[in-house]
């Protein structure tokens, strides 16, 4: 992973960069994420909100009400107004964080989730890895997911020395 991380929407109208290392990457198996992606789960990457910068275009915002989300938190969902690609979310409960959809990064080869959340709504054919940090529903906080990411990063740095 090389900083800055760069990414954008499918049509190229909106571009962004991330200038600090992510805090964690995990997979969410909630029904909301399944509907949003049309897939079995969505990858999420937590970054410091002030490390995320839109470099081209202007994303469209949609406020997803908390009453309709798995986490119960209202979230500003940022997407391209032209092609509809979901780029990142700005949760109201954590104004210092952004949740990036890392599939929109230019380089996705290094993405490996350290955990899985909302596993009780995972598709039955998907096997949740036993060696990751897993939650049946919403975790009480992201501490264990962040710690697992840090351990993986530190282990990788030590292995590369």
Image (spheres, rainbow, N blue to C red):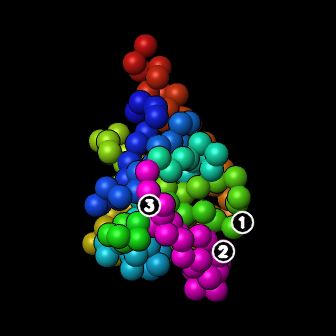
Give residue 51's position: percent from left, percent from top.
59, 42
**Range covered by the magenta-colored residues:** 56-79
Q: Which is nearer the N-term, disc 3 or disc 2?
A: 2
Give residue 152's position: percent from left, percent from top.
48, 35
**SS assignment at label 2:** loop
Residue nearer the viewer, 7 or 150: 7
Q: Is residue 60 left or right of residue 76?
A: left
Q: Which residue is mark 3?
A: 87
The image quarter containing residue 104 is bottom left
At a point 49% along the width and 55% down the height, the residue shown is 100
At a point 44% along the width and 60% down the height, the residue shown is 87
The CA distance from mark 3 to mark 2 is 18 Å
Q: Is residue 20 left or right of residue 4?
A: right
What label does residue 47 carry, if any? none
**SS assignment at label 3:** strand
Question: Is residue 70 in sight in this rendering?
Answer: no
Give residue 111's position: percent from left, percent from top.
37, 45
Q: Which residue is situated farthest in the bottom direction here? A: 67
At a point 50% along the width and 50% down the height, the residue shown is 54
Residue 70 falls within the magenta-colored stretch: yes
Q: Which residue is mark 1?
A: 93
Residue nearer the viewer, 137 or 21: 21
Quarter of the picture containing the C terminus is: top left
**SS assignment at label 1:** loop
Q: Which is nearer the N-term, disc 1 or disc 3?
A: 3
The CA distance from mark 1 to mark 3 is 19 Å
Q: Is residue 3 above or below residue 49?
A: above
Q: Which is nearer the N-term, disc 1 or disc 2?
A: 2
Q: Which residue is mark 2?
A: 73
């Amino acid at each position: 992973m090389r900083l800055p991380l760069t990414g954008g929407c499918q049509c190229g109208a909106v571009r962004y960069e991330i200038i600090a290392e992510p805090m964690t990457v995990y997979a969410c198996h909630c029904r909301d994420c399944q509907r949003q992606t049309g897939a079995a789960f969505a990858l999420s990457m937590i970054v410091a909100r002030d490390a995320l910068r839109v470099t081209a275009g202007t994303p469209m915002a949609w406020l997803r009400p908390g009453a309709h989300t798995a986490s119960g938190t209202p979230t500003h969902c940022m997407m391209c107004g032209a092609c509809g690609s979901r780029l990142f979310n700005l949760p109201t409960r954590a104004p210092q964080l952004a949740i990036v959809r890392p599939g929109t990064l230019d380089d996705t080869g290094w993405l490996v989730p350290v955990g899985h959340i909302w596993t009780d709504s995972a598709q039955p054919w998907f096997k949740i890895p036993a060696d990751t940090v897993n939650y049946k529903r919403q975790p009480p906080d992201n501490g264990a997911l962040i710690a697992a990411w840090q351990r993986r990063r530190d282990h990788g740095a030590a292995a590369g020395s």
